[in-house]
Amino acid sequence: MRKRYWIPLLVVALVLVGFFGVLPGYLESSMNRIDGKPLTVVSPEAAALHRSLHIVDLHSDSLMWGREITEVGERGHEDLPRLTAGNVTLQVFASTTKTPKGLNYDSNPSDSDVLPALLIAQRQPYATWFSPLQRSLFHAAKLDHSVWLSQGRLLKVTDQSSLDRLLGKHARANGPVGAMLSIEGLHDLEGKAENLGKLYAAGFRMAGLTHFFDNELAGSMHGEKKGGLTPFGRQIVVMMEDKGMIVDIAHCSHQCVADVLAMARRPVVSSHGGVQATCQVNRNLTDDEIRGVAQTGGVIGIGYWDAAICDTSPRAVAKAIRYVRDLVGIDYVALGSDYDGATTVRFDTSQLVQVTQVLLDEGFTPQEIRAVMGGNALRVIRAGVLPLRASPSGGGGSAKR
């Protein structure tokens, strides 16, 4: 009789152990991969130049996964030890809060969400299971806890003064890494403009309007209708610029991109992706869109995965960077890895010297490499996190028109 009871209990226990103990790590390992193909040989010249750079990555999804980023990870693409090894000055951490069922690049409905299963398996608070807003606030709290755990090795950047402190400290041996919060799709506003203030108070200083589906603000390049900005979306863009939150057009539909660029008063970014000229994937930017971003004074973050550059090699990264440089100038291109964003890449963040090496090989000057690897992004961040009402220009912002 006893056997009849303990066997089902054992089965249930094993299922729970698998769901809570094995599944989260398995999913992350299988979705965030390094392909293992050969890397470029790094020269002493490239290694020395790389150590002297201020490096900024405009997009990673590491906060989505159930591990502590201050600890050395056995999976994924980045954590604090690997950021330090790669000489990263500032990492922008995105809050990803909704993933539609059957996710694809062509057309996704907005009425499904597969993330709750992962959140439950990772034992996140109940409030996050069904609320995108609470998921972003949880990610902000998670980063704050990591900053506290790091004992000065990870510094949160929210304004110009904290950015200045980071740059001053990072220049020293074993200096800290900066962390800035972004949002991948403002569906986490849950249709309420006042929630933007909650996100700002939590430390978010950049936000993409859409992710893989259309929402209340705008159409996504991967949505069903792919429309432009809605009246609510226009309201939020104005509020973001007034507060000092950088507007990110990654994942926006072409009409959404056009609408944002037409009304922008501040530099606009495309935080992670590529360009149509070197990789014809729908999410990548056209020449006119590249010119439009440059006219605002913004930057285009080039990713490292195949849908951004149609390859995973460092040389393909350099090819996209060179195209933007040749079209609009070196000042408008940056790095946007999409690390830990369900991507397969050639190198993790500890190996970013790979990009420095191939840029040297492709004939970029050290000054150009400094701009691409971080200087351009730092310029845009410094301008973008300053509230518009506090701008010395009296509200005109820093965008080039």
Image (cartoon, grey):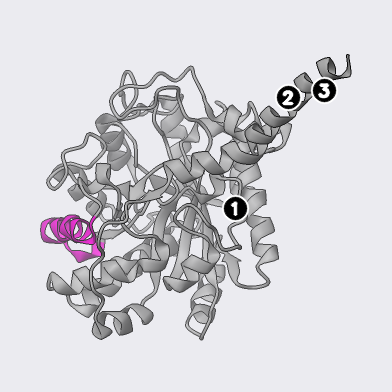
* Label 3 SS: helix
> Distance between the Cα atoms at labels 2 and 3?
10 Å
Front in this rendered view, residue 239 or 51: 51
Tag 2: Cα neighbours inside 10 Å, few (<14), some, or many (≥20)? few
Residue at image coords 58%, 39%: 24
Tag 1: Cα neighbours inside 10 Å, few (<14), some, or many (≥20)? many
Tag 3: Cα neighbours inside 10 Å, few (<14), some, or many (≥20)? few
User: Does residue 339 appear left or right of residue 145 in this picture?
Assistant: left
**Quadrant assignment, res 354:** bottom left
> Distance between the Cα atoms at labels 3 and 1?
49 Å
Classify 253 as above or below 149: above
Is 325 within the magenta?
yes
Identify the image quadrant of the N terminus.
Answer: top right
> Distance between the Cα atoms at labels 2 and 1?
41 Å
- The residue at which mark 3 appears reads as 6
- The residue at which mark 1 appears reads as 203
- In the image, which disc is placed on residue 12? 2
State the image coordinates of residue 312 (x, y, percent, origin top left): 25, 52
Residue at image coords 22%, 34%: 282
Task: Determine whether label 3 and label 1 are within 8 Å by CB.
Answer: no
Residue numbers of the magenta segment: 313-331
State the image coordinates of residue 152 (x, y, percent, origin top left): 64, 73
Is 59 within the magenta?
no
User: Does residue 278 appear left or right of residue 169 in this picture?
Assistant: left
**Quadrant assignment, res 398:** bottom left
Of labels 3 and 1, the one closer to you:
3
**Quadrant assignment, res 231:** top left
State the image coordinates of residue 225 (x, y, percent, origin top left): 31, 18
Give the mark nearer the N terminus: 3 vs 1. 3
Q: Main secondary structure of the magenta part?
A: helix
